[in-house]
Image: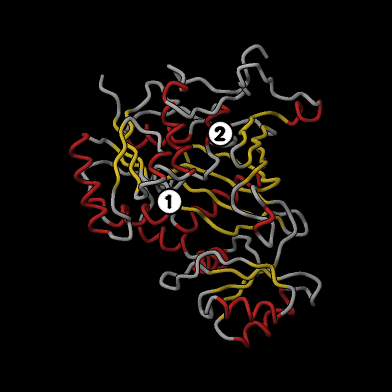
Amino acid sequence: MERTRILVTGAGGPGTVNLSRSLLMMDPAPWILAVDASPYYIHLGLGHERALVPRASDRDAYLDALAALCVEHRIDLIIPNNSLEIAVLAAAPERVPARLYLPAPAVLDTANSKWASHQVWRDAGVPVPETRLLETPEDIERVFPKLSRGGQEAVWVRGAGIPGKGIGVASLPCRTPGQALEWVRYWDGFGGMIASELLPGDNLTWMGLFEHGRLVTSQGRKRIAYVIPHVSPSGITGAPAISHTVSDPELNRLGELAVLTLDPAYHGVGFVDFKGDRAGRPRVTELNAGRFGTTHFFYTAAGANFPETLVRLALGQPVDVPLRDALPPDLFWIRTLDAGPVLTTREAIEAGRWPRFDEAGGLWPRVPQNFGDFPPAASPMWPPPGQ
Protein backbone atom coordinates (compact mmCIF):
# COMPACT_ATOMS: atom_id res chain seq x y z
CA MET A 1 0.00 0.00 0.00
CA GLU A 2 1.42 3.37 -1.05
CA ARG A 3 2.07 5.87 1.69
CA THR A 4 -0.18 8.90 2.06
CA ARG A 5 1.39 11.92 0.39
CA ILE A 6 0.96 15.19 2.29
CA LEU A 7 1.93 18.76 1.41
CA VAL A 8 2.56 21.06 4.40
CA THR A 9 2.73 24.82 3.91
CA GLY A 10 4.76 27.37 5.84
CA ALA A 11 7.04 24.42 6.49
CA GLY A 12 9.81 26.39 8.20
CA GLY A 13 7.56 27.93 10.82
CA PRO A 14 7.52 26.43 14.32
CA GLY A 15 3.90 25.30 14.09
CA THR A 16 4.47 23.40 10.86
CA VAL A 17 7.80 21.96 11.99
CA ASN A 18 5.94 20.44 14.92
CA LEU A 19 3.12 19.38 12.59
CA SER A 20 5.65 17.54 10.42
CA ARG A 21 7.19 15.91 13.48
CA SER A 22 3.75 14.64 14.45
CA LEU A 23 3.06 13.32 10.95
CA LEU A 24 6.39 11.50 10.92
CA MET A 25 5.44 9.76 14.17
CA MET A 26 2.55 8.03 12.36
CA ASP A 27 2.69 4.35 11.47
CA PRO A 28 3.13 4.18 8.57
CA ALA A 29 4.59 7.66 8.26
CA PRO A 30 3.38 9.68 5.25
CA TRP A 31 5.56 11.09 2.51
CA ILE A 32 5.85 14.86 3.06
CA LEU A 33 6.41 17.73 0.65
CA ALA A 34 7.48 20.77 2.70
CA VAL A 35 6.84 24.14 1.03
CA ASP A 36 7.62 27.66 2.19
CA ALA A 37 7.83 31.14 0.69
CA SER A 38 11.09 31.98 2.49
CA PRO A 39 14.40 30.89 0.95
CA TYR A 40 15.76 30.89 4.51
CA TYR A 41 13.09 29.20 6.61
CA ILE A 42 12.64 26.47 4.00
CA HIS A 43 15.87 25.04 5.47
CA LEU A 44 13.99 24.27 8.69
CA GLY A 45 11.17 22.37 7.00
CA LEU A 46 10.88 18.62 7.58
CA GLY A 47 9.98 16.99 4.30
CA HIS A 48 11.13 14.23 1.99
CA GLU A 49 11.28 17.01 -0.59
CA ARG A 50 11.09 20.78 -0.31
CA ALA A 51 9.84 23.48 -2.66
CA LEU A 52 9.71 27.27 -2.64
CA VAL A 53 6.32 28.81 -3.44
CA PRO A 54 5.03 32.39 -3.79
CA ARG A 55 3.66 34.13 -0.73
CA ALA A 56 0.01 33.44 0.00
CA SER A 57 -0.68 37.18 -0.27
CA ASP A 58 -0.16 36.69 -4.04
CA ARG A 59 -3.17 34.41 -4.11
CA ASP A 60 -3.30 33.33 -7.73
CA ALA A 61 0.42 32.64 -8.01
CA TYR A 62 0.35 30.81 -4.68
CA LEU A 63 -2.61 28.61 -5.60
CA ASP A 64 -1.22 27.88 -9.07
CA ALA A 65 2.10 26.81 -7.55
CA LEU A 66 0.42 24.50 -5.03
CA ALA A 67 -1.79 22.99 -7.73
CA ALA A 68 1.23 22.23 -9.92
CA LEU A 69 3.09 20.65 -6.99
CA CYS A 70 0.05 18.53 -6.13
CA VAL A 71 0.00 17.13 -9.65
CA GLU A 72 3.77 16.64 -9.84
CA HIS A 73 3.99 14.84 -6.49
CA ARG A 74 0.57 13.12 -6.47
CA ILE A 75 -0.44 14.85 -3.24
CA ASP A 76 -3.39 13.40 -1.32
CA LEU A 77 -3.82 16.06 1.36
CA ILE A 78 -2.70 19.65 1.99
CA ILE A 79 -2.31 20.78 5.61
CA PRO A 80 -1.66 24.50 6.09
CA ASN A 81 -0.87 25.76 9.58
CA ASN A 82 -1.02 29.55 9.56
CA SER A 83 -4.03 31.82 9.31
CA LEU A 84 -3.28 33.47 5.95
CA GLU A 85 -2.61 30.26 4.04
CA ILE A 86 -5.61 28.59 5.68
CA ALA A 87 -7.87 31.47 4.59
CA VAL A 88 -6.59 31.42 1.01
CA LEU A 89 -7.01 27.66 0.62
CA ALA A 90 -10.39 27.49 2.37
CA ALA A 91 -11.75 30.17 0.02
CA ALA A 92 -10.66 28.32 -3.13
CA PRO A 93 -10.59 24.55 -2.53
CA GLU A 94 -11.38 23.92 -6.19
CA ARG A 95 -8.01 25.42 -7.17
CA VAL A 96 -5.97 22.55 -5.72
CA PRO A 97 -6.31 18.86 -6.71
CA ALA A 98 -5.92 17.51 -3.16
CA ARG A 99 -8.02 17.17 -0.06
CA LEU A 100 -8.31 19.84 2.62
CA TYR A 101 -9.69 19.62 6.15
CA LEU A 102 -10.52 23.21 7.04
CA PRO A 103 -13.27 25.34 8.58
CA ALA A 104 -15.61 27.32 6.32
CA PRO A 105 -14.33 30.72 5.08
CA ALA A 106 -17.06 32.61 6.97
CA VAL A 107 -16.06 31.17 10.34
CA LEU A 108 -12.39 31.83 9.58
CA ASP A 109 -13.24 35.49 8.94
CA THR A 110 -15.12 35.72 12.23
CA ALA A 111 -12.47 33.90 14.26
CA ASN A 112 -9.65 35.99 12.80
CA SER A 113 -11.39 39.16 14.01
CA LYS A 114 -11.17 39.38 17.79
CA TRP A 115 -13.93 41.99 17.81
CA ALA A 116 -16.32 40.05 15.55
CA SER A 117 -15.85 36.80 17.48
CA HIS A 118 -16.21 38.62 20.81
CA GLN A 119 -19.56 40.05 19.74
CA VAL A 120 -20.88 36.63 18.68
CA TRP A 121 -19.82 35.02 21.97
CA ARG A 122 -21.07 37.92 24.09
CA ASP A 123 -24.49 37.90 22.42
CA ALA A 124 -24.74 34.10 22.85
CA GLY A 125 -23.92 34.25 26.55
CA VAL A 126 -20.45 32.70 26.29
CA PRO A 127 -18.31 34.14 29.13
CA VAL A 128 -15.89 36.72 27.69
CA PRO A 129 -13.91 39.66 29.11
CA GLU A 130 -15.62 43.05 29.14
CA THR A 131 -14.47 44.58 25.83
CA ARG A 132 -15.13 47.77 23.83
CA LEU A 133 -14.23 48.85 20.31
CA LEU A 134 -12.24 52.10 20.31
CA GLU A 135 -13.49 54.32 17.51
CA THR A 136 -12.71 57.79 18.91
CA PRO A 137 -10.53 59.33 21.65
CA GLU A 138 -13.70 59.92 23.61
CA ASP A 139 -14.29 56.15 23.72
CA ILE A 140 -11.09 55.74 25.73
CA GLU A 141 -12.16 58.30 28.32
CA ARG A 142 -15.61 56.73 28.55
CA VAL A 143 -14.63 53.05 28.95
CA PHE A 144 -11.44 53.39 31.00
CA PRO A 145 -12.99 53.91 34.46
CA LYS A 146 -15.06 50.74 34.24
CA LEU A 147 -12.47 48.52 32.56
CA SER A 148 -9.75 49.67 34.98
CA ARG A 149 -12.00 49.19 38.02
CA GLY A 150 -11.71 52.82 38.92
CA GLY A 151 -8.03 53.04 38.07
CA GLN A 152 -7.03 50.00 40.15
CA GLU A 153 -6.08 47.81 37.18
CA ALA A 154 -4.47 48.18 33.78
CA VAL A 155 -6.62 47.96 30.65
CA TRP A 156 -5.67 45.58 27.84
CA VAL A 157 -5.49 47.58 24.56
CA ARG A 158 -4.82 45.61 21.40
CA GLY A 159 -5.58 45.17 17.73
CA ALA A 160 -9.11 44.00 17.04
CA GLY A 161 -8.12 41.79 14.11
CA ILE A 162 -10.52 43.66 11.82
CA PRO A 163 -9.63 42.84 8.18
CA GLY A 164 -8.02 45.67 6.24
CA LYS A 165 -6.82 47.61 9.29
CA GLY A 166 -3.29 46.18 9.17
CA ILE A 167 -2.73 46.55 12.90
CA GLY A 168 -1.97 43.01 13.99
CA VAL A 169 -1.81 42.07 17.66
CA ALA A 170 -0.37 45.36 19.04
CA SER A 171 -1.11 44.45 22.67
CA LEU A 172 -0.29 46.74 25.58
CA PRO A 173 -1.52 46.87 29.20
CA CYS A 174 -2.29 50.57 29.73
CA ARG A 175 -2.59 52.10 33.20
CA THR A 176 -3.92 55.51 32.20
CA PRO A 177 -6.23 56.84 29.47
CA GLY A 178 -3.27 58.87 28.20
CA GLN A 179 -1.18 55.75 27.66
CA ALA A 180 -4.05 54.10 25.82
CA LEU A 181 -4.60 57.18 23.66
CA GLU A 182 -0.96 57.37 22.59
CA TRP A 183 -0.83 53.63 21.91
CA VAL A 184 -3.88 53.78 19.64
CA ARG A 185 -2.56 56.89 17.91
CA TYR A 186 0.79 55.20 17.34
CA TRP A 187 -1.00 52.49 15.36
CA ASP A 188 -3.47 54.92 13.76
CA GLY A 189 -5.83 52.42 15.30
CA PHE A 190 -9.17 54.07 15.93
CA GLY A 191 -11.81 51.73 14.55
CA GLY A 192 -9.36 48.83 14.57
CA MET A 193 -8.39 48.42 18.23
CA ILE A 194 -10.22 47.20 21.33
CA ALA A 195 -9.93 47.72 25.07
CA SER A 196 -10.62 44.86 27.49
CA GLU A 197 -10.54 44.32 31.22
CA LEU A 198 -7.19 42.79 32.20
CA LEU A 199 -8.07 39.49 33.85
CA PRO A 200 -5.68 38.22 36.55
CA GLY A 201 -6.32 34.47 36.35
CA ASP A 202 -4.81 31.47 34.59
CA ASN A 203 -3.76 31.43 30.94
CA LEU A 204 -5.56 28.41 29.52
CA THR A 205 -6.05 26.85 26.13
CA TRP A 206 -8.20 24.05 24.73
CA MET A 207 -7.66 22.31 21.41
CA GLY A 208 -10.40 20.34 19.69
CA LEU A 209 -10.73 18.45 16.42
CA PHE A 210 -14.17 18.51 14.80
CA GLU A 211 -15.90 16.71 11.94
CA HIS A 212 -18.88 18.67 10.57
CA GLY A 213 -19.90 19.92 14.01
CA ARG A 214 -19.06 16.75 15.93
CA LEU A 215 -16.24 16.90 18.46
CA VAL A 216 -13.80 14.05 17.81
CA THR A 217 -11.07 14.60 20.41
CA SER A 218 -9.76 17.40 22.62
CA GLN A 219 -7.26 18.43 25.29
CA GLY A 220 -6.84 21.36 27.70
CA ARG A 221 -3.63 22.96 28.87
CA LYS A 222 -2.42 25.66 31.27
CA ARG A 223 0.43 28.01 30.35
CA ILE A 224 2.77 28.85 33.23
CA ALA A 225 5.51 30.95 31.59
CA TYR A 226 6.49 32.22 28.15
CA VAL A 227 9.62 32.29 26.00
CA ILE A 228 11.55 35.62 26.21
CA PRO A 229 8.86 37.34 28.32
CA HIS A 230 11.02 40.46 28.75
CA VAL A 231 10.36 41.53 25.15
CA SER A 232 6.65 42.02 25.87
CA PRO A 233 5.20 44.61 28.30
CA SER A 234 2.66 42.02 29.45
CA GLY A 235 5.20 39.19 29.78
CA ILE A 236 3.10 37.16 27.34
CA THR A 237 4.68 36.38 23.98
CA GLY A 238 2.39 33.67 22.63
CA ALA A 239 5.15 31.05 22.83
CA PRO A 240 4.78 29.02 26.04
CA ALA A 241 7.99 28.03 27.80
CA ILE A 242 6.28 26.00 30.53
CA SER A 243 2.82 24.48 30.21
CA HIS A 244 0.99 21.43 31.47
CA THR A 245 -2.07 19.38 30.64
CA VAL A 246 -5.25 19.90 32.64
CA SER A 247 -8.47 17.96 33.08
CA ASP A 248 -11.21 20.55 33.69
CA PRO A 249 -14.87 19.83 32.84
CA GLU A 250 -15.70 23.55 32.63
CA LEU A 251 -12.79 24.22 30.27
CA ASN A 252 -13.91 21.28 28.14
CA ARG A 253 -17.48 22.59 28.06
CA LEU A 254 -16.54 26.14 27.20
CA GLY A 255 -13.97 25.14 24.57
CA GLU A 256 -16.51 23.12 22.63
CA LEU A 257 -19.19 25.78 23.17
CA ALA A 258 -16.94 28.59 21.90
CA VAL A 259 -16.18 26.74 18.67
CA LEU A 260 -19.73 25.60 17.95
CA THR A 261 -21.17 29.03 18.76
CA LEU A 262 -19.19 30.45 15.86
CA ASP A 263 -20.19 27.55 13.60
CA PRO A 264 -22.48 24.67 14.64
CA ALA A 265 -21.03 22.69 11.72
CA TYR A 266 -17.40 23.52 12.51
CA HIS A 267 -14.98 21.33 10.56
CA GLY A 268 -11.28 21.04 11.33
CA VAL A 269 -9.00 21.83 14.22
CA GLY A 270 -9.29 24.86 16.45
CA PHE A 271 -7.76 25.99 19.69
CA VAL A 272 -9.47 28.36 22.06
CA ASP A 273 -7.60 30.72 24.39
CA PHE A 274 -8.95 31.62 27.83
CA LYS A 275 -8.04 33.93 30.69
CA GLY A 276 -9.27 33.33 34.21
CA ASP A 277 -11.28 36.06 35.93
CA ARG A 278 -10.97 37.10 39.57
CA ALA A 279 -13.12 34.16 40.65
CA GLY A 280 -10.95 31.71 38.70
CA ARG A 281 -13.56 31.16 35.99
CA PRO A 282 -12.25 30.86 32.42
CA ARG A 283 -13.38 33.46 29.90
CA VAL A 284 -12.94 33.03 26.16
CA THR A 285 -10.54 35.47 24.48
CA GLU A 286 -10.08 34.03 20.98
CA LEU A 287 -10.36 31.05 18.65
CA ASN A 288 -7.41 30.14 16.45
CA ALA A 289 -9.35 28.46 13.68
CA GLY A 290 -8.05 25.76 11.37
CA ARG A 291 -4.55 25.38 12.78
CA PHE A 292 -2.59 23.59 15.47
CA GLY A 293 -0.78 25.66 18.09
CA THR A 294 2.99 25.88 17.91
CA THR A 295 3.50 23.48 20.83
CA HIS A 296 1.05 20.75 19.81
CA PHE A 297 3.92 18.27 19.44
CA PHE A 298 3.72 18.19 23.25
CA TYR A 299 0.56 16.10 22.87
CA THR A 300 2.09 13.85 20.22
CA ALA A 301 5.15 13.19 22.39
CA ALA A 302 2.83 12.25 25.23
CA GLY A 303 0.84 9.84 23.05
CA ALA A 304 -2.05 11.91 21.58
CA ASN A 305 -1.23 12.64 17.93
CA PHE A 306 -3.86 15.19 16.85
CA PRO A 307 -2.42 15.66 13.32
CA GLU A 308 -2.63 11.90 12.76
CA THR A 309 -6.30 11.98 13.72
CA LEU A 310 -6.89 14.86 11.30
CA VAL A 311 -5.21 12.92 8.48
CA ARG A 312 -7.35 9.87 9.13
CA LEU A 313 -10.53 11.94 9.21
CA ALA A 314 -9.58 13.75 6.01
CA LEU A 315 -9.00 10.43 4.24
CA GLY A 316 -12.23 8.89 5.56
CA GLN A 317 -10.46 6.40 7.80
CA PRO A 318 -11.81 5.28 11.19
CA VAL A 319 -10.43 6.84 14.37
CA ASP A 320 -10.50 5.63 17.96
CA VAL A 321 -9.48 8.48 20.26
CA PRO A 322 -10.75 9.91 23.57
CA LEU A 323 -13.45 12.55 23.16
CA ARG A 324 -12.12 14.71 26.00
CA ASP A 325 -8.94 14.78 28.08
CA ALA A 326 -6.92 12.83 25.54
CA LEU A 327 -4.01 12.89 28.01
CA PRO A 328 -3.73 12.68 31.81
CA PRO A 329 -3.35 15.95 33.73
CA ASP A 330 -0.06 17.39 34.98
CA LEU A 331 2.19 16.37 32.09
CA PHE A 332 4.66 19.27 31.72
CA TRP A 333 6.33 20.54 28.53
CA ILE A 334 9.38 22.71 29.25
CA ARG A 335 11.34 24.57 26.56
CA THR A 336 12.92 27.87 25.59
CA LEU A 337 14.90 29.19 22.63
CA ASP A 338 17.27 26.50 21.34
CA ALA A 339 16.78 24.43 24.50
CA GLY A 340 14.46 21.49 25.16
CA PRO A 341 11.73 20.57 25.00
CA VAL A 342 11.54 18.20 27.94
CA LEU A 343 8.41 16.22 28.77
CA THR A 344 7.97 15.41 32.44
CA THR A 345 5.34 15.28 35.19
CA ARG A 346 4.39 17.35 38.20
CA GLU A 347 5.37 14.41 40.39
CA ALA A 348 8.87 14.28 38.89
CA ILE A 349 9.30 18.04 39.24
CA GLU A 350 8.25 18.05 42.89
CA ALA A 351 10.52 15.07 43.63
CA GLY A 352 13.50 16.69 41.89
CA ARG A 353 13.83 13.93 39.28
CA TRP A 354 15.45 15.49 36.23
CA PRO A 355 15.97 14.04 32.74
CA ARG A 356 18.95 11.77 32.26
CA PHE A 357 21.99 13.13 30.47
CA ASP A 358 24.51 10.78 28.89
CA GLU A 359 28.03 11.28 27.54
CA ALA A 360 26.76 11.42 23.98
CA GLY A 361 24.71 14.49 24.86
CA GLY A 362 21.38 12.72 24.86
CA LEU A 363 18.73 14.49 26.89
CA TRP A 364 15.42 12.69 27.00
CA PRO A 365 13.22 13.19 25.10
CA ARG A 366 15.28 13.66 21.98
CA VAL A 367 13.17 15.88 19.76
CA PRO A 368 13.29 14.62 16.17
CA GLN A 369 15.31 17.00 14.00
CA ASN A 370 16.26 14.76 11.05
CA PHE A 371 14.56 11.85 9.36
CA GLY A 372 16.82 9.32 11.03
CA ASP A 373 15.57 10.51 14.41
CA PHE A 374 12.03 9.28 13.87
CA PRO A 375 10.97 5.85 15.12
CA PRO A 376 10.11 3.18 12.54
CA ALA A 377 6.69 2.79 14.18
CA ALA A 378 4.45 5.08 16.16
CA SER A 379 5.23 5.08 19.85
CA PRO A 380 4.56 7.72 22.50
CA MET A 381 7.65 9.37 23.95
CA TRP A 382 6.12 9.16 27.42
CA PRO A 383 6.79 7.34 29.69
CA PRO A 384 10.52 6.93 28.99
CA PRO A 385 11.86 3.40 28.60
CA GLY A 386 12.71 1.73 31.88
CA GLN A 387 10.35 3.80 34.02
In the image shown, does 295 or 142 lie closer to the viewer?
A: 295
Number of marks drawn: 2
In the image shown, does 246 or 4 lie closer to the viewer?
A: 4
Give the residue number, with chain letter if any, for mark 1.
Answer: 82
- In the image, what residue type sits under mark 1? Asn
- Rendered position, 101 above or below 142: above
Secondary element at tag 1: loop
Question: Alpha-carbon distance for marks 2 and 1?
Answer: 19 Å
Picture coordinates of residue 136 (x, y %)? 57, 86
Please give left or right for residue 149 compared with residue 191 in the image: right
Q: Residue at x 49, y 68 (%)?
A: 116
Please give left or right for residue 150 compared with residue 165 in the image: right
Q: Earlier in the sequence, mark 2 or mark 1?
A: 1
Front disc: 2 or 1:
1
Which quadrant of the structure image shows residue 232?
Answer: bottom right
Q: Residue at x 30, y 57 (%)?
A: 91
Give the residue number, with chain letter if any, for mark 2.
Answer: 299
- In the image, what residue type sits under mark 2? Tyr
Quarter that holds the N terminus: top left
How dense is the environment of label 2, judged by Cα within 10 Å: few (below 14), some, or many (20 and up)?
Answer: many
Picture coordinates of residue 61 (x, y %)? 23, 56
Secondary element at tag 2: helix
